[in-house]
Amino acid sequence: MAKHIVCLTFDHDNMSPFVARGMTTPTQISRGDFGIVAVPRILKLLKQYDIATTWFEPGHTIETYPDCARAVFAGGHEIAHHSWAHVTPTALSREEEEADLARGNEAIHRLTGKYARGYRSPSWDLSPHTLDLLLKHDFIYDSSMMADDYTPYRVRDGDVIELHKPAIRGAATRLVEMPISWALNDFPVFDYMRLPKFKTMEEAAAVYCRRNVA
Ligand SMILES: [Zn+2]
C-alpha cells in the first residue's frame, strides 16, 4: 500500500512581519498577539492526533513571546529558522543577512539547546548570498523555493541569470530543498495585509523593496 507523508509546517510570526513593515499601531500589533490565543489551540489539536510538525520561529517571536515558543518546543515540534527580524534577505547586505541569521540561531539555541538545521526565508525569497550562508552555517535544508510540489530536491547554487540570454544553471549543493507553494499557504486565502500609506510612489517603492515580507 502506498505510504503518504505530509509535512505540516507553521511560520510562527506573531507581530514580527508587522514590525518589519513599520506597522506598529495597536491594531497591527494585536494581530500578532492573536498568536498567544491561537498557538495553544493548535498545539492541543496536534497533541490530540499525535502529529509532529515544524515551526519556523523568528528570533523576534522567541524573545517577544517566550512562553509561546517554549510551549511549541515542549510539544515536541521541530524549531526551525525564520530569520530574527522577519525582514526579507533581499533587502540586506551579506553582512546584515549573516548577522540576522546568527542572531536568530542563537535565539533558537537558547530555546532548544541546539542550532536550527532548517531555514525558511521570511519573504519566501532568497538573496544572492542566502544559500552560501546556509551552507556556511551548516543548515541541512531550506524551505523557501518552489521547483517541485512535494518531492525534496538538492538546491542549486551559482545560477547565471541574465536578461536576453539563456539561463545557466549552477551545480547542486548538499542543501536539501523542502519545497513550498503559495497555493498551499493559508495566509493569502484567509488573511489580509494592508500596507502603510506613503506620501510618494518613490517612498512606497523604497519601503516595499526593503520590507517585502511574507
Ligand atoms: Zn513569516
Image (cartoon, rainbow, N blue to C red):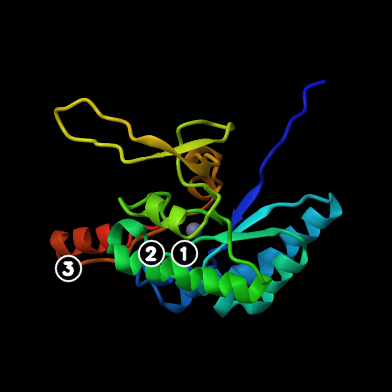
Residue 92 x/y as whole percent: 30, 63
Quadrant showing the C terminus: bottom left
Q: Give the residue number, with chain letter if any, for mark 1.
A: 83
Q: Disc 3 or 1, which lies upstream in sequence?
A: 1
Disc number lying in front (2 or 1): 1
Q: Between residues 56 and 137, which one lies in front from this camera angle?
A: 137
How many other residues sit within 10 Å of disc 3, few (<14), some (14-19) or many (≥20)?
Answer: few
Image mark for residue 159: none
Q: Between residues 152 and 6, which one lies in front from this camera angle?
A: 152
Q: Amino acid at mark 2?
A: Val
Residue 113 x/y as whole percent: 67, 72
Q: Between residues 114 and 79, which one lies in front from this camera angle?
A: 114
Discs 3, 1 touching: Cβ within 8 Å: no
Side of 152 relative to 47 (left or right): left
Q: Give the residue number, with chain letter if any, for mark 3.
A: 199
Discs 2, 1 touching: Cβ within 8 Å: yes
Q: Residue at x 20, y 58 (%)?
A: 205
Residue 104 x/y as whole percent: 50, 70
Side of 18 relative to 200 (left or right): right
Residue 78 x/y as whole percent: 68, 58
Q: Give the residue number, with chain letter if any, for mark 2.
A: 87
Does residue 190 sit above or below 41 in this rendering?
Answer: above
Does residue 81 sit above or below 30 in this rendering?
Answer: above
Q: Residue at x 52, y 66 (%)?
A: 58
Q: Disc 3 or 2, which lies upstream in sequence?
A: 2
**SS type, badge 3:** loop
Side of 159 relative to 27 (left or right): left
Q: Amino acid at mark 1?
A: Ser
Quadrant showing the N terminus: top right
Q: Can residue 42 be seen by looking at this rendering? A: yes
